[in-house]
Image (cartoon, rainbow, N blue to C red):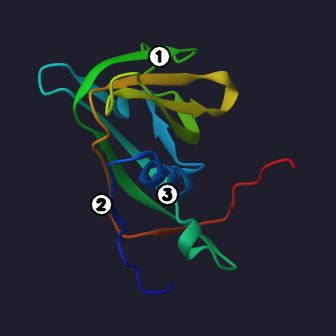
Amino acid sequence: MAEHKPLRLLAQDADDLGVLSAALQDAVAKIGDIRWDAQSRTLTIACNRFRWEGAGKKGERVRSALQFGDVAGVQARNLRRDAKGAVVELLSIGFEPAEEAPAGIVTLTFAGGGDMRVSVDCLDVALADVSDPWATPRTPGHAD
């Protein structure tokens, strides 16, 4: 296994968020690992991220934390919040600015048709690897 350099990324604009989206493509999380704290205005997702930047002949995953700050609200569609053990796979993260910058809507799109809309007053997103990577026999694949 190659030396692991944990990712530590911040996103404060749509271009930055695109980098986070690429790093998190095919990350998996349990519904119970998605936490919206209205009082602290944060949305935190603990996930197992596929290490695209370290993908060689053998794939690796690493435990990561994604946190959105300045969150005004969260809406979920086709995600069963009561199924805490259900696994979701993140496909992409997008941003749609509001009329009054820097506010907008962050959309997390999951495999199977689920998504989350995160209303933010500004983009304040952090991604951090929080474990050592481990080998995985499966590299995510997508139909062309």
Q: The disc labelled 2 sits on which kind of residue?
A: Val
Front residue (pair 97, 4): 97
- In contact (CB < 8 Å): disc 2 and disc 3: no
Residue 114 x, y percent position in the rendering: 60, 22
Which label number is shown at residue 76? 1
Which label number is shown at residue 44? none
For residue 44, what is the image quadrant?
top left
Q: The disc labelled 3 sits on which kind of residue?
A: Val
Mark in front: 2 vs 3: 3
Q: Is residue 77 left or right of residue 101?
A: right
Q: Is residue 17 left or right of residue 11?
A: right
Residue 120 x, y percent position in the rendering: 31, 27
Q: CA distance from mark 3 to mark 1?
A: 23 Å
Q: The disc labelled 1 sits on which kind of residue?
A: Ala
Task: Give neighbour class at mark 1: few <14, some 14-19, many 20+ (Cα, 10 Å).
Answer: some
Secondary structure of residue under mark 1: strand
Which label number is shown at residue 19? 3
Residue lying furthest bottom: 2
Secondary structure of residue under mark 2: loop
Mark in front: 3 vs 1: 3
Question: Who's the residue at 53% across and 33% down the image?
Answer: 87
Residue lying furthest right: 144
Question: Who's the residue at 58% across and 41% down the image?
Answer: 92
Residue 59 x, y percent position in the rendering: 62, 69
Question: Who's the residue at 29% across and 60% down the image?
Answer: 130
Image position of 111 with respect to 3: above or below: above
